[in-house]
Image (tube, rainbow, N blue to C red):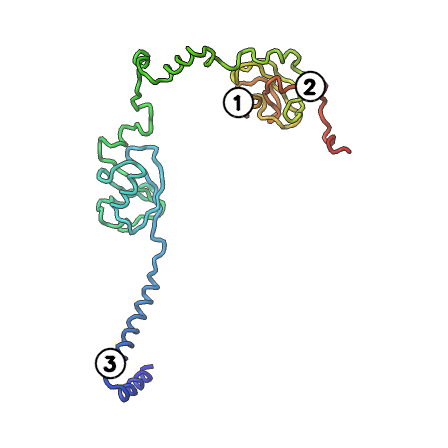
C-alpha cells in the first residue's frame, strides 16, 4: 500500500509538481486520522444513560414514587423536577442517595455536578430532605386532613348572608310550598302490593323474567315506598338479596354492605317496584322451551 502510494506520488510530481504532492499527502494523512477517530466513536456510542430511582420524603411519610432520570442531568435540574412532585422548593431541598439495602451512598450536595457522578443504580432510593420549617409539606396536613383547620359559620351569620341556598329555598317554598316535599311518599305503590304475597310465582318486566316473590314491604335503606323482592329462576338478578345502590326506578346493583331483605343464590335476586311485578300462574320455563317449533 505504501509502495503504491509512493508510485502515485512520483507520477503526480512528474505531471503536476510539488503542490499536488503536498495536497495528496494531506488527504492521505487526514483520512488516516479520521478512521481511528470514527472507530473510537463507534465504540463509545451511548447506551441507556438513565436510571430508575425510588423516591421518599422527610415530611411525607406516605409519599412513594419512582422517577427515571438521565445520568447527565445536573443535581439542580433533578431538584427542579422533584419539587413538582412533592412541593419542596429547590432552595429548601437536600438529596440523599441510598442503595437497595437502605445504606446511605452519598449526599448530592453539589448542584452543578451531573447525577451520574454519584453512581446511582436502578432501584436506589433518592431521599428528599425538606429543611424549611415553614414548608408546605411540614405539619402533616397534606396526609392527614383532620389536621386542617376547617372554616365554620354559625347559623345566625349564615342567615344574614344573601344568595345562599337557604335563602333560595325559602323563596321557592313561599311561592310553591310543595316544591321541596318528597316526590315519593312512604306509602308509594302500597295499593299494588295487595295481590302480591311472599311465595307467589311472578313475572317481572321488562324481559318477562320469572321467579318467586321473596319479600313485600318497605325498604328504608333503598328509597321510600313499597318494594317487591324477587328470586329469579335464572341468574338474571343483581344480587343475592342484599341490594345497595339505586341505579334506576326498579333495579339495584349488588353489594355486600346493604341490608338483607331475603336470601337467594348469587345473581338471582332483585328488588323491584310493585308495578313491574305480575303475580300468578307463571311456572318455571323449560330449558329448551323457546327452541321448540
Q: Quadrant of residue 262?
A: top right
Q: Residues within 10 Å of mark 3 (few under 14, many from 20)?
A: some
Nearest to the observer: residue 8 or residue 36: 8
Nearest to the observer: residue 196 or residue 95: 196
Q: Is residue 194 above or below residue 108?
A: above
Q: Is residue 242 above or below residue 108?
A: above
Residue 291 picture location, percent across and down: 74, 34
Q: Is residue 16 above or below residue 73?
A: below
- Write the residue at 60% across / 22% down: 270
Alpha-carbon span between mark 2 and mark 3 = 111 Å
- Decide which of tag 1 and tag 2 comes sooner along the chain: 2
What residue is pinned by disc 2? Answer: 201
Q: Is residue 190 left or right of residue 53?
A: right
- Asked whether the viewer can see residue 87, the reply is yes
- SS of the residue under disc 2: strand
Q: Which mark is residue 246?
A: 1
Q: Is residue 140 left or right of residue 194?
A: left
Q: Which mark is residue 22?
A: 3
Residue 245 picture location, percent across and down: 51, 23
Q: Is residue 198 left or right of residue 169?
A: right
Q: Viewer-nearest of labels 1 and 2?
A: 1
Q: Residue at the bottom extreme?
A: 14
Amino acid at each position: 500500500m505504501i509502495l503504491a502510494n509512493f508510485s502515485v506520488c512520483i507520477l503526480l510530481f512528474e505531471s503536476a509538481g510539488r503542490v499536488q504532492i503536498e495536497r495528496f499527502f494531506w488527504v492521505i494523512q487526514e483520512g488516516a486520522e479520521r478512521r481511528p477517530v470514527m472507530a473510537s466513536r463507534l465504540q463509545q456510542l451511548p447506551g441507556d444513560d438513565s436510571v430508575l430511582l425510588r423516591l421518599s420524603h422527610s415530611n411525607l411519610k406516605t409519599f412513594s414514587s419512582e422517577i427515571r432520570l438521565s445520568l447527565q442531568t445536573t443535581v439542580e435540574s433533578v431538584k427542579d423536577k422533584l419539587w413538582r412532585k412533592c412541593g419542596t422548593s429547590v432552595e429548601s431541598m437536600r438529596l440523599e442517595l441510598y442503595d437497595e439495602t437502605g445504606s446511605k451512598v452519598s449526599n448530592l450536595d453539589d448542584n452543578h455536578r451531573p447525577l451520574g457522578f454519584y453512581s446511582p443504580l436502578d432501584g436506589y432510593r433518592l431521599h428528599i430532605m425538606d429543611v424549611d420549617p415553614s414548608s408546605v409539606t411540614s405539619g402533616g396536613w397534606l396526609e392527614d386532613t383532620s389536621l386542617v383547620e376547617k372554616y365554620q359559620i354559625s347559623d345566625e351569620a349564615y342567615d344574614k348572608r344573601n344568595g345562599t341556598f337557604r335563602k333560595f329555598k325559602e323563596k321557592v317554598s313561599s311561592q310553591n310550598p310543595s316544591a321541596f316535599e318528597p316526590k315519593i311518599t312512604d306509602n308509594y305503590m302500597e295499593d299494588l302490593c295487595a295481590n302480591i304475597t311472599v311465595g307467589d310465582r311472578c313475572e317481572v318486566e321488562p324481559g318477562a323474567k320469572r321467579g318467586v316473590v321473596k319479600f313485600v314491604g318497605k325498604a328504608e335503606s333503598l328509597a321510600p315506598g313499597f318494594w317487591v323482592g324477587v328470586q329469579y329462576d335464572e341468574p338474571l338478578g343483581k344480587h343475592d338479596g342484599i341490594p345497595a345502590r339505586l341505579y334506576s326506578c326498579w333495579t339495584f346493583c349488588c353489594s355486600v354492605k346493604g341490608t338483607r331483605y331475603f336470601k337467594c343464590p348469587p345473581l338471582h335476586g332483585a328488588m323491584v317496584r310493585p308495578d313491574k311485578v305480575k303475580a300468578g300462574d307463571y311456572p318455571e320455563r323449560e330449558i329448551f322451551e323457546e327452541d321448540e317449533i
